[in-house]
Amino acid sequence: MTAAARKSINWVALWNQGQLRWRRARRSFDGRVLNERRLLIIAVVAGLWFVVDSLWITPGYKQLAASLARKNQAEQAVLALQERQRLQLQDMARAQAAVKSELQITRERMSRQQEAFEKARQVLVPAREMRALLEGLLGEQKSLRVTSMKTLPREAIQLPHVDRTGQAAVIYRHGLEIRVVGSFHDLLNWLRSVESMPRKVMWDEMSLEADDQAALTLTLKVHTLSNDREPLEMPP
């Protein structure tokens, strides 16, 4: 007899034994009173429910609850992250608005300063004309004598804006030192004429000295602002 045949016979025997036991159990069940049969049915159903609950329902419910808890945690984390991002974006927007406002205020202030500076510069004597203008004023005062006139070192002044080429704007400070001898009245009239000129110079320093013969020497330092890069030149 082959192994396949023995295996087939075993399955048949088992099937027959199972049917036999089922008939016996059925006869025994049928022989019981109605209440006992109900109790047996309830017990069997309860047992089956316990097995199903233990193997599938309770583990599945726990897995579902754990999954829902993880989902809720993930959603809460996402909401918290979104809230932080929203607050960060609000802070960035406020900071950008503040910077933009400050930048606009600074530009307006620089523009006003530039306009005021340009107006003031237009009133000043150009550097190339300053010497001739002062000499002309001295020529009107015949009683005054110029003992010296020399240039002061040129200074470059950085302006708080850029020119049309995109380079930092620079203007130059040109100065003169003049020593004039004369009477007090003549010196005073000359200073008044300098002050009343339509084109102005800015005064840096002024001093008055007297010698043993009571002759007065006035030392005056003046300067102007100009785009002229070349320094003033004075003959020795």
Image (cartoon, rainbow, N blue to C red):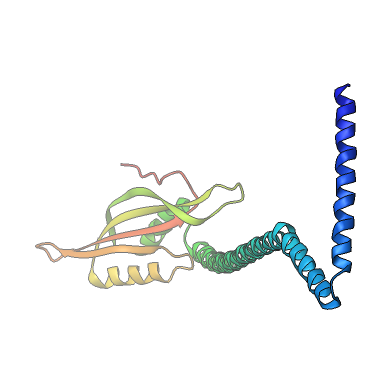
Q: Quadrant where the N terminus lies?
A: top right
Tell which of 34 and 190 is nearer to you. Answer: 34
Report whether 182 appears left or right of 54.
Answer: left
| Percent of width and height locating residue 161 | 53, 56
Q: Which residue lies furthest to the bottom in this view?
A: 35
| Residue 142 seen in the current view | no
Choose between 113 and 145: the one closer to the eye.
113
Q: Which image quarter: residue 101?
A: bottom right
* Quadrant housing the C terminus: top left
In the picture, measured across the screen, residue 97 lies left or right of residue 185, that is right
Q: Is residue 156 above or below residue 82?
A: above
Locate residue 174, reporting x and y percent: 40, 52
Instruction: Say which of 33 and 136 sits in front.
Output: 33
- Residue at the left extreme of this rendering: 212
**Number of marks in the image?**
0
- Name which residue lies at 32% across and 62% down: 204
Residue 21 image position (x, y, % from top left): 85, 53
Is 17 rendered above or below residue 42? above
Q: Quadrant of residue 85?
A: bottom right
- Left or right: 112 with respect to 235? right
Residue 201 is drawn in which quadrant?
bottom left
Residue occupying image coordinates x 13% and y 66%: 214
Foreground pick, 60 / 169: 60
Q: Can residue 120 be seen in this view?
A: yes
As drawn, 9 above or below 14? above
